[in-house]
Every structure is written in structure tokens, then in C-alpha cells.
Image (cartoon, helix red, strand yellow):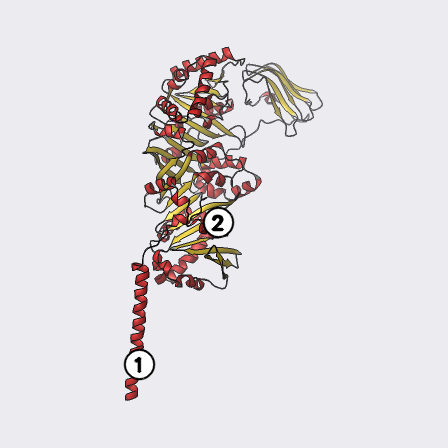
Amino acid sequence: MLFETFLIMTKKRILFGLLAAMLIYVFYLLYLLVLSPKTNLQSIYLIPKDAVFVIESEQPVESWQKISESEAWSHLLKNDYFAELTENIQKVDTIFNDQRRLFEFFDDRSLFISVHMISPKEYGLFYVLDLKRIAKLKLLKTYLNTLLNDNYTLSKRNYHEHEILEVFDRKNKKTMYLSFIKNQLIASYTHSLVEASIDQYKEPVLGRDLNFIEVNQRVGFEDLFRLYLQYDYFDDYFRRFSDRPGDWVNRLSENFLFSGFHFDLDRNSTITANGFTNISFANENYLEALQKSGTAPRTIPKIAPKRTALYVSYGFDSFSEFYRNFETVQEDNPEQFAAYRSGIQKLEKFLKINIKENFVSWIDDEIALLQIQSSIEKGKNDIALVLKTNDKKDAKTNLDFILSQIKRKTPVKFKAVSYEGYEINYLSIKGFFKILLGSRFNELDKPYFTTIDDYVVFSNSPNTLKSIINDVVEKNTLSSSKDFNAFNKRFERKSSLFVYSNIPVLYNNMYALADGKTRIQLRKNKDFIICFPQIGLQLTPEDNLFESRLVANYKNVDKVKMSEQFQEKSLQPIPTPQVSKTKVITESVFKLKPIYPSDLTAKEYVKKFINGAVRYQVELKDGLKHGRFVEYYQDGTEKMTGRFRKDEQIGTWRYFDEEGELLLKKRF
């Protein structure tokens, strides 16, 4: 009896002891997780300063679930990279389900993912997860061991007084690097990113950048996730696709600082992002003037071809107001303004014209730059500047006056060329638009121009103007495209800056300019690039920032390839009929394809074979075939001869075989 009483008392002591231990542990957890002083570190402080993109989510699991269920993501899973990414996330998701009690602590904890260039062609991903007070539980580090199986090995090393855990994947031969810094868990497959984070956490760069903070505070906390873009490093990122990024890429890096967006995804997998953008203080003149000059509706799609790869629209209440603001803003930099005024005054004095009266006055509320897929030469981008007129008769009168002054002051003698009823002229003033509007228009040097409806179109190549005219005549313009019109409705009707990109056409242009290695990657991933066939960005003034909207619409890639707007059209060279004595020679050999001289002041046009031998040559006058025409075989023997007058065949034309024997002749 005494022994039984002793056992009961012993059990009670043990029970009370366990209860006491549990209470102590509960109070310990309560202190750690609720009562202890907060010494939390912001996640953004740990992101290395050279981030190109930063993605932030307050509910990463819920957001990921919505993304993973979308049609767009189902298509992207066919891509090796996205498939591997999803596989890893699904592994984590399985752990979440198996260990739900533990991982309930992770609800509503922010996750940051940043993209960094770690070599000219490779980027690395960096992750930051805010553990909040749970980070104080030492068992969290040791719990990592239970997540690993025989396929992984865990090792540790110290770096600047911080422990880095290295998880090596035996199967994929990759190492994940992790470290705990106060309440944050940082991780990456690139060790240098983890080390860079440790180096700067006491003196953060990106997270304390006032320009970043300005955008960050305005973005808000809505929808799926937020994305920030740091333009300083955008050109470095773009070089992974092309060693020769276009001027528009450089302009982004020079003129913008940060953009911040909050994203949403609709049932059709269209991504819509709204946010804010700030501009560079060092190169902000143009954008600051734009910000002060109001907005305008977009109308240039009436003449922009469907094959436009990039449409950059600048809108304002009036161009005259914008131009006044442009001059006023430049006055803040006396040296720069003096150089600008000197260039204008020299031009006005030399030609005896007034820039504001003879040029600025007739421009209305929109100008645009167009990058167009060439319909003549594969792998070439056509560039055009379009100015909307407020009075096309007034525009013609003033442009005719400027042309007459050029003819008086320069040796260039050029007669207007008529094409499909439109007159093409030559503005032979070197650097005219660079002097007038700055370096963003320096690509237009001594351009040709024509007037189409209420628009004056400038381009260095007359063939670009001809191709635009063809599309207007055939009604193959953006405004006639159902795809473009539906996409355009997702934006405000008026804007200060609007950028529209036709991704399949832009893809073709990028491919033509890319190096061999990049071309392989572009071909491999083509279906995962063009599945977002239209992407647009709109900026409208809001205080000292630009309110920004970004839209990317998803479309089944097979439908993209079938869509008329996105058809890939092969460019056919002028055929050279191969004939012999045994074949019947008909007069069709004298029907010649049109030629496209890029210089309408040239006296001769020459086309060559791949080996460099002359294929044919013809004399020119004002861009028209005018004079002797000779076509050759590759060995230099004459194949066809004749004459042109004002682009029309005249006289007797002759066709010869390879031995020089006359096979056929025709009188025109």
C-alpha cells in the first residue's frame, strides 16, 4: 500500500514537472514571439544593390496558387526553366502540407525575389523570406536537417561572422546557399549574392535609396505581387539577349530611375500592372518637359503599319507648349542650354528660317517613333518619326519654304519623287532633329519625308516611307487591327508616353541582331516569348512622378502564329530567271521587280550576287530608274540590256544566253 502511494506521488511529481516545463516553454515562446523587443530587419535591406528586378509578395503561397492555375503558366511549364522552378516549388508545397503545424508560422510573411546579372549572359536569383519573430527559435535552423533526404548534403561555413548553410543537391550538382540574418532567411544558388547581402546589411543601398523609397511608398499593397525595376542595370540585363542593345534600351537606363507596380492576373491570363515611375535628375529634361505638358489621345495608329514592332507615342496638350517647357527646363543647365540655343541660332541664320514659326507651329498634340519590320530587307529595322499636324496645308507651306531655303544654301539638288500619289521629299539638314529635340532623335540624319493624311512621316530611308504608304493604301495599319484595338482599350485614352510592342515582330528584329549563342536560346524559347504577343506601357503625369500602367496579354501560341497581324512573312528577293537554249524564252523575262534605292540622290543603283559580282546596275535620277540598265550572269557576261526613262522601260530591250547569243528582244 505504501509502495502504491509512493508510485502515485512520483507520477504526480513527474506530471507536475512536465506541466511546469511546458508552461515555462510556453512562456518562453510567448516572450520570444510576442513580448520580446522587436529588432526586425526590413527584407529590402538585404537585397544586393545591383538588382535589375525585385518581386515582392505578402502572401506568396496564395499568390503562387493563383499563378500556377492560369493557362499562361500551364503553357510556360513546357519550358525547361519554368518546369524545374515548378518542380522545386511543388516539393516545398508538399513539405508545407506534411508539416502544416510548423509552417503555419509562415502565413502572411513577405517573400522577396530579385534578379541580378552575375555574368554578361547569365543572371542569378536571390530570395529573402521574412520569418519575423519565429526566427528567434533556434530549432528552426536544426529543423532544416529533417527536410533533407539522402539526395542532399548539408555543410556550414562562416562568412564575415555569419553562418552560411550549403545544401548540395547530389542529383543536379547544384548548391543552395542559405543564411539567417536577424528575422530574415536569405537564399540563392549563387554564393556571391548571399555574400553581397551579408556585406551590405548594416549599410543597405537599394532599400535606403530615396528614389526607390519614393516609388515604393506609392505602389500600395494589392493583388498578387509587386515588381520593382531598377533601370541602371536594365541595359546589362538586355545584353544577355543581344550584344547590341538598341538606343531605346540605353534611353531607358539614362532617363528612368525606378518603376514599381502591383500586379493582377485575370481569367484570360492577361497581366495588368499599375504603379509609378520616377525619372533621372541627370537626364530628365525631356521627360520633365513632357510631365508638365499635359496628355493627348493616340491617333498615329491610323497610319502605323501592323508590322510595327515598337510604337513610342509622346502626347501633350500641344507641341508648342511642350517645346516651351523643353526650353525652360534646359535653362537649369546653363552650359547645356547655351549649346542648344547656339545650334538653333546657327541653323536659323544659315537657312534664314524661324524654327518656331516654320516648324514647331504646325505640329499638333502627338509625335511618335516607330520601329517597323522591314518589308524589303530581312534582318533590318526601319525607323520612322511621325508628327501629327494641326493644319496639313500650313505644314506643307512651311516645309516647302524650308526646302526652298535648303536648295538655295546647299549644293543638294533633289526633285520630289511621287509614289502612289504621295510626294517624297528630302530634308538634307544634318542633325536637324537632334538640334531641335535632343539626342533621342539622332538616328534621323538628313531624312526623307512625306505627308500622309494629317501626318508628316520622316525616315532615313525612302523605302520605309514607301512601305508605310503601301500599308496605308492597303489598310494594313494598327487601327485596322482588332488585336491592337482590343489591347489599346486596356489603357487610358490619353497619355504623356505610351509604348506598344508587338512581341512576335520584335522577336524577329531581335533575332536578326543577336549573336549565334543568343539565337540558339531565342529559337529554343520562341514559343514562350511570343505567347505574350502584345505588351504596353503607359505613363501619365502624377505630382512629380509618372503614374504607370503595364499590360501583357497572354494568347495561345498556336493562335498567335495563325493571327494575320503576327504572321511571319518571308521576304522574297528579286528573282533572276535561269534559262537555257532548250527552254522557251517568253517576254515575261522583261518584267522586272521594283528596286529600292536607299539614297534618292544617288546616280546609280547596283545589286550584287553573294560572291560580290555585279548582278545588275541601272542609272538613277531623283530616285527613279532613268538611263541604261544592264543585268549580268555571275561570270560577268551580259544577260539583259535596255533603258529607262522616269521609271518606265523604253526603246529596245535584249536578252542573251551565257555565250552572248541573242535569245529575245522587245520594243517598248
**Is residue 8 toward the left or the right of residue 51 in the image?**
left
Three-letter amino acid code of the residue under disc 1? Thr
Pick whichever, 626 or 248, lies toward us: 248
Tell me the tag on residue 81. Answer: 2
- Residue located beneath label 1 in the image: 10
Task: Please name the residue shown 45% across and 53% down the image.
Answer: 187
| Quadrant in which residue 609 is drawn | top right
Task: Please name the residue shown 39% across and 30% down the image.
Answer: 287
Three-letter amino acid code of the residue under disc 2? Tyr
Does dot 2 land on a helix, a strand or a loop? Answer: helix
Question: Real-space Cα distance between discs 1 and 2?
Answer: 61 Å
Pick whichever, 364 or 326, lies toward us: 326
**Is residue 545 toward the left or the right of residue 600 in the image?**
left
Crowding at dot 2, Cα within 10 Å, few <14 / some 14-19 / many 20+, comes out as: few
Task: Please name the residue shown 63% across and 30% down the image.
Answer: 610
Eye-nearest disc, 1 or 2: 1
Tell me the tag on residue 150. Answer: none
Name which of mark 1 and mark 2 comes first in the sequence: 1
**Is residue 668 toward the left or the right of residue 232 in the image?**
right
| Quadrant in which residue 492 is drawn | top left
Whether residue 145 appears in this view of the structure is yes
The quadrant the N terminus occupies is: bottom left
Return the x and y of residue 91 as percentages of the image width and height. 43, 58
Does dot 1 land on a helix, a strand or a loop? Answer: helix
Return the x and y of residue 606 as percentages of the image width and height. 61, 22
Residue 54, compared with residue 385, is above or below; it is below
The quadrant the C terminus occupies is: top right
Return the x and y of residue 45 as percentages of the image width and height. 40, 48
**Marks 1 and 2 close (CB-CB < 8 Å):** no
Return the x and y of residue 393 as percentages of the image width and height. 38, 15
Crowding at dot 1, Cα within 10 Å, few <14 / some 14-19 / many 20+, comes out as: few
Whether residue 78 appears in this view of the structure is no
